Amino acid sequence: MSFEELEHTADVLMRIRGATLSELFSEAGRAMFHVMYGPCEDRGIVRQIALEAEDLESLLVDYLSELLFIADTENLVFCTFDVDLQGNQLSAVVRGEPFDPERHAGGTLIKGISYFGLEIVKEKDVYVVDIIFDI
């Protein structure tokens, strides 16, 4: 669906929308990597993620934190996110490319995901969450 950056005093605040919870999680991954690296292309790098958490908000933080960990340790940038949610269990296939300093160095380094104010809500036909990325 969409994501947009909102005004925040110190960190990056993003409002994420998705028609389904799976799309919401996919858009959250896309938003995070957009903030960090800008444009990305699927160049054949594929990673699979499987997680489970007590609630959807914790699952979202765990998912985004896992993406950050993989990107940092393997020097990768992800741009497509195929997420499947079954209750509080997540399986995802993410695709992207190796980090290229000439193409990806213009973004903002994200150090973590904040739980502050994190609540997934359903508004009419769309799920919405505001996420603070710690920079």
Image: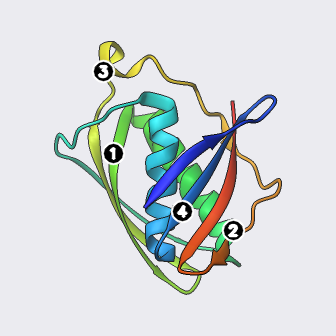
What amino acid does circle 2 point to?
Glu
What amino acid does circle 1 point to?
Cys
Give the mark nearest the N terminus, 4 or 3. 4
Q: Are marks 2 and 4 in contact (CB under 8 Å)?
A: no
> In what element is the residue under mark 3?
loop
What amino acid does circle 3 point to?
Asp
Q: Quadrant of the C terminus?
A: top right
> In what element is the residue under mark 1?
strand
Mark closer to the observer (4, 3): 4
- Residue 134 at x, y = what percent? 71, 36
Which is more toward the observer, 63 or 9? Answer: 9
- Residue 42 at x, y = what percent? 21, 43
Q: Which quadrant would residue 70 be assigned to in this image?
A: top left
Q: Quadrant of the N terminus?
A: bottom left
What residue is shown at x 36% (from left), y 36% (from top)?
77
Mark 3 lies on residue: 100
Mark closer to the observer (2, 4): 4
Mark 2 lies on residue: 57
> In what element is the residue under mark 2?
helix
Give the mark nearest the N terminus, 4 or 1. 4
What residue is shown at x 69% (from left), y 68% (from top)?
57
Give the mark nearest the N terminus, 2 or 3. 2
Mark closer to the observer (3, 1): 1
- Left/right placement of residue 49 relative to residue 43 reads right
The residue positioned farthest toward the bottom in the image shown: 87
Q: Which mark is residue 79?
A: 1
